[in-house]
Amino acid sequence: MSAGASGASSPPQARRRVPAVVVLASAAGLFASACGAPDPGSIGGALDCRERPRFAAELGFTAGSALSTGDAELPGLVLVDVANPDRNYQHPSWVQHGHLGPFTLDAHGNVYVAPTPFMSLLESPPEAQNTIYRVDTDSGEMGEFTQFAPAGLLSAENPFGILGLTYDCHSDSLYASSVAGSSRRSELGQIVRIQLSDGAVVDSLPGIDAMGLAVFRGTEDRRLIYGSARRPEVWSVALDERGSFQGAPRRELALPEWSDRASSIAFDADGRMEIVGVPFAFNLAVGTDVAQENAYGYRYDPATESWQADAAP
C-alpha cells in the first residue's frame, strides 16, 4: 500500500455486521474472479471490464470478497470476506463521511460511492448528498471526487440526493441519479453522466427521479436502464458512442408490487436482469429490522427488444 493510505496496512478488525436499518443505504458488490474486455457486439450488461481494487488483494482478500455499505454498526464502506463474515476491513478514510449508499467500480478497480442519510441529518446534511467520493484502487484512500448542483431548491421534506451509481465500460463514463431538489409533489431530479478524467458533468437528463442504474447492450443500441423513484416502473434511455443520452426515455416494464421502487438493477452473465424493489417515499425509513425487499428477474427477448418476467416457480 502507498504511504498515503494511513492505516491501510493494519490488520482488519473482526467485527460482526448487522442488518442495515435504512434499505436505501444498503449495497453490496462481490468481486468477480476474472474480468475481460467488453465485447461491443454481445448482448448483456456493460460491467464486464471492471477490476477488483488492488488494495483488496494486498490485504489478503480473495476474489470472493465484497464491498458493502449500509451497515448500522459499521457506517461507511466495508470490505468483507464472504467466506468469513467476521473478518472485515475499513480504511480510516472510509468512515469520515458518515453513512454511504450506492457505489460502483471502474475498469481500474477504483470505487465511487455516494453518501446517504441514516435516521438523522446530522452526519449527512442535504447539501452534501450530491457528492461522489472515490476510493483509490492502490492506496485504498477515499476522497471527494466530484459534487454537482441539485436540480432545485433543497427541502426539509426530502433528505436524499444520489440514489444510484453505475459505470459504463464502453465509454468509461460514470452515471449518477439524484433526487436532490425534488419534493413529494415535484419531480425535479436528474441523471447525469460524469467524465472520469476530471469529474465534470458532461450530460444531464433532467426532470427524472431515479434510483437503481445499469447499462445494457441490446440488439439495437446500448441503453441506461433506471428505476423510477416515484412509480413501480423501470425505464431506459439510449446512449451514443460517447455515453451521452440520446432520444426520449422509454418504459421497459412495471414491477408487480405497486409500492416497490427499483433500488438496484444488475445483470448476470447470461444477460438476465435482477431487480431489488423497496418502498420509497422521500423520507427516512427507520426501524429495528431490515425493511422488506422484493427480488425480481427478467429476461431480454432480442426479437422484440422487450423484457419478460421469469416464470413463477
Image (cartoon, helix red, strand yellow):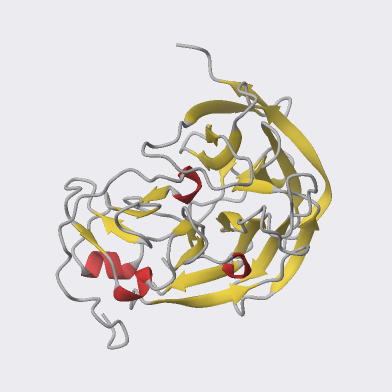
In the shown orientation, is residue 30 left or right of residue 255?
left
Residue at the spot x=51%, y=58% of the render? Answer: 116
Taking depth in this image into account, of 41 and 225 the one nearest to the observer is: 225
Vertical placement of residue 162 versus 212, above or below = below
Give the residue at the far right of this rendering.
247
Give the residue at the far bottom of this rendering.
3
Q: Quadrant of residue 243?
A: bottom right
Q: Can residue 306 be seen in this view?
A: no
Q: Quadrant of residue 110?
A: bottom left
Residue 52 placement (x, y as % from top left): 36, 60
In the shown orientation, is residue 192 left or right of residue 21?
right
In the shown orientation, is residue 239 left or right of residue 38?
right
Residue 9 placement (x, y as % from top left): 20, 76
The quadrant of the picture occupied by the N terminus is bottom left
Q: How many numbered marks are there?
A: 0
Residue 297 placement (x, y as % from top left): 52, 27
Residue at the spot x=72%, y=42% of the render? Answer: 236
Residue at the spot x=49%, y=63% of the render? Answer: 113
Q: Is residue 136 visible?
A: yes
Residue at the spot x=74%, y=40% of the render? Answer: 220
Vertical placement of residue 306 versus 229, above or below = above
Taking depth in this image into account, of 291 and 88 the one nearest to the observer is: 291
Residue 283 placement (x, y as % from top left): 59, 46
